[in-house]
Amino acid sequence: MDNSNLKSENPIGIFDSGVGGLTVAYAIKKALPNEKIIYFGDLAHLPYGEKSPEAIKAYAKDIVNFLLSKKCKSIVIACNSASAVAARTVARQIKNKAILVTVIEPTAKYVANNYNKQEVGVIGTKATINSCIYPNTIRKINPTIKIKTKATPLLVPIIEEGFKNSIISKETLSVYLSSNELKNIQAIVLGCTHYPIIKAQIKEYYKNSIEVIDSAKLVATELRNLLSKKGLLNTLKNPKHEFFVSDYTTVFEKTARIFFRSPIKLKQIKL
Ligand code: DGL
């Protein structure tokens, strides 16, 4: 794809339904400290995981138009549910106006390259698990891997309500992770960008006996490689990140402040 129209000084657009994408935004901020980030949290439509593919595509389309209007050189779908059902539609919409990165591809590549002939679990929202995107993408690269999936829909509302690392998240995780569908796995993919927020409890459940794979760093590395290859890395000293939401919640504001370690001002907009 010819991206010669893109400018290195332009920002990186990142979106998710809520706080989950902040895990990816944080990894991007660390890997690319000289880039300006524009984050969009679609709190008005949360949770994406319970919505139809048509609804998620429509939300993604509006957000992508907004991020393109902000001249983003790259758009990162920091949401597995949207990456699973809307990536193709978004790619057609973006054409060569920005570099598209999803959370699925880098994670699938990592699993395919590291778990030959093994069994790997994937947990995610209903939208992600029902799409079969992980088994399909991983097995296309490495058909020797057996992928075991389980939808874990209660985790996003628990996290968005601020009950991370609580007895509620612990008990819910224990019910989900002990299910037959996830027996005998050698690694588990956090197939929802909200789940790294409770990664410590997931690791604790497995007593650190298996790898808990979190896509955030993998996505940040993929983005850095792509921008570098295309000569699009920025050199800003103190980038002023911007945070937009389609609805306001205190949990989002607090979580964004924790991740970005600065007094963040949310801008609420209607798309
Ligand atoms: N964080 C998102 C994901 O990775 C969406 C969660 C939701 O809104 O249901 O799937």
Image (cartoon, grey):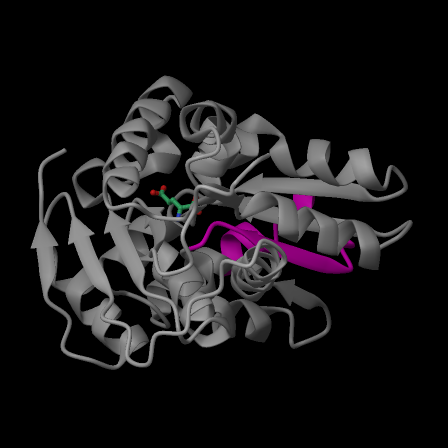
Residue 230 located within the stretch drawn in magenta = no
Q: Establish if 162 lies above or below 151.
A: below
* Position of residue 49 in the picture relative to residue 3 (left or right): left
Q: Quadrant of the N terminus?
A: top right
Q: Establish if 99 lies above or below 248.
A: above
**Residue 106, horizontal then vertical, whole percent:** 64, 51
- Which residue is rendered at x = 37% and y = 21% of the image? 52
Task: Give the quadrant of residue 190.
Answer: bottom right
How many numbered dots are placed on residues in this image? Answer: 0
- Which residue is rendered at x = 49% and y = 64% of the image? 233
**Residue 25, horizontal then vertical, whole percent:** 39, 63
Residue 180 located within the stretch drawn in magenta = yes
The range drawn in magenta is 174-193
Task: Give the quadrant of residue 90.
Answer: top left
Q: Nearer the viewer, residue 60 or 145?
A: 60
Q: Nearer the viewer, residue 168 or 137?
A: 137
- Which residue is rendered at x = 45% and y = 37% of the image? 81
Locate ligand 1 by image quadrant. top left
* Position of residue 175 in the picture relative to residue 119 (left or right): left
**Residue 138, horizontal then vertical, whole percent:** 74, 41
Q: Nearer the viewer, residue 207 or 109?
A: 109
- Which residue is rendered at x = 32% and y = 36% of the image? 64
